[in-house]
């Protein structure tokens, strides 16, 4: 199957008790490992490029890479812009072949978040591109404090923006190295009630214990889990192992190639936990 949109892969999750892994890509080796893992598990995959990745690799390169991988595999592959900070960045991603964009206006007043998100939805939908937005603030572990999503704002936000998926803050946090986050199921249920039939997204998925991720996929409208930190940790360990195994090796292609299989194995576990 060729490249897919976010709506294509998340809509079935609302009724089949599964969720899709959205894996943070920082380079070719990551992306290749993740697509191979999805192929092995016969599940869709979302390859996402966040601000850190985009600082290192141009959007045009990322778009071409994601689409090349998607076109060569049998499972749906979404090319997703994560934490797009402006209309201009989202427009650039669409121009570069991304099939899904996230606009993050979570730090803005509600009216401004709605207005800017609506503008991006109008743009994206004209190109058959999906849009994820964020309501509430998902913070960064030990750095930026979260602000829980207010269920009273959810219905208005969803109706007035027309988003395809909504990232929510219910105890999840970015950059957690241990799965110790406590998801507020009562708050999640209130959000779900306010936005029926809308796929919800949890950023900071590495902080949520895998068994809990499976339960949430089966019992709630959470259809997308963003996973980055735990896979980056596997990359770091596998690269250190490769360097220690042969300290005289210096060819970057050889060294980085040794990270692909460990990342693929770790990604398969993540993907399987959501299916």
Image (cartoon, rainbow, N blue to C red):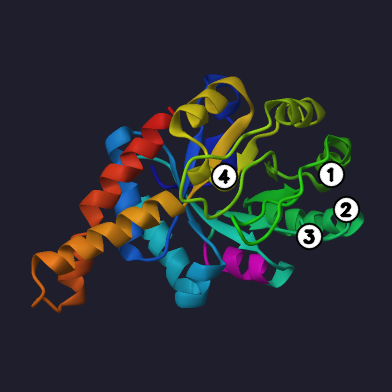
- Secondary structure state at the residue bearing disc 4: helix
Q: Which residue is mark 2?
A: 110
Counting residues from the start of the chain, the first of labels 3 and 4 encountered is 4
- Secondary structure state at the residue bearing disc 2: helix
Q: Which mark is residue 6?
A: 4
Point 43% across, 27% down: residue: 275
Disc 3 to disc 4, C-alpha distance: 23 Å
Q: Which mark is residue 34?
A: none
Q: Which residue is mark 3?
A: 107
Q: Are marks 3 and 2 in contact (CB under 8 Å)?
A: no
Disc 4 to disc 1, C-alpha distance: 19 Å
Point 10% across, 64% down: residue: 245
Q: Position of residue 232 (x, y in %)?
A: 38, 57
Disc 2 to disc 4, C-alpha distance: 24 Å
Q: Which residue is mark 1?
A: 157
- Secondary structure state at the residue bearing disc 1: helix
Residue range corresponding to the magenta coloring = 89-97
Query: Is residue 74 at all visible to an observer of this figure?
Result: no
């Amino acid at each position: 199957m060729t490249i897919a949109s976010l709506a294509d892969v998340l809509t079935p999750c609302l009724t089949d008790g599964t969720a899709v892994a959205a894996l943070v890509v920082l380079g070719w080796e990551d992306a290749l490992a993740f697509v191979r893992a999805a192929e092995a598990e016969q599940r869709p995959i979302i390859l996402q490029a966040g601000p850190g990745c985009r600082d290192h690799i141009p959007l045009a390169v990322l778009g071409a890479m994601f689409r090349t991988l998607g076109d060569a595999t049998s499972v749906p592959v979404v090319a997703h812009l994560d934490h797009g900070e402006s209309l201009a960045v989202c427009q650039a991603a669409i121009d570069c072949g991304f099939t899904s964009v996230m606009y993050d206006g979570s730090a803005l007043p509600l009216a401004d978040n709605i207005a800017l998100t609506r503008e991006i939805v109008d743009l994206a939908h004209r190109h058959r591109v999906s849009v994820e937005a964020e309501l509430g603030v998902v913070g960064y572990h030990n750095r930026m404090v979260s602000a829980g999503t207010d269920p009273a704002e959810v219905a208005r936000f969803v109706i007035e923006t027309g988003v395809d998926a909504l990232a929510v803050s219910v105890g999840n946090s970015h950059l957690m190295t241990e799965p110790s986050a406590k998801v507020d199921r009562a708050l999640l249920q209130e959000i779900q009630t306010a936005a029926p039939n809308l796929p919800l997204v949890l950023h900071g998925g590495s902080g949520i214990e895998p068994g809990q991720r499976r339960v949430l996929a089966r019992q709630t409208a959470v259809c997308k889990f963003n996973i980055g930190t735990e896979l980056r940790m596997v990359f770091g360990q596998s690269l250190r192992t490769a360097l220690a195994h042969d300290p005289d090796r210096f060819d970057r292609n050889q060294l980085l190639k040794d990270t692909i299989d460990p990342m693929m194995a770790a990604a398969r576990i993540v993907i399987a936990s959501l299916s």
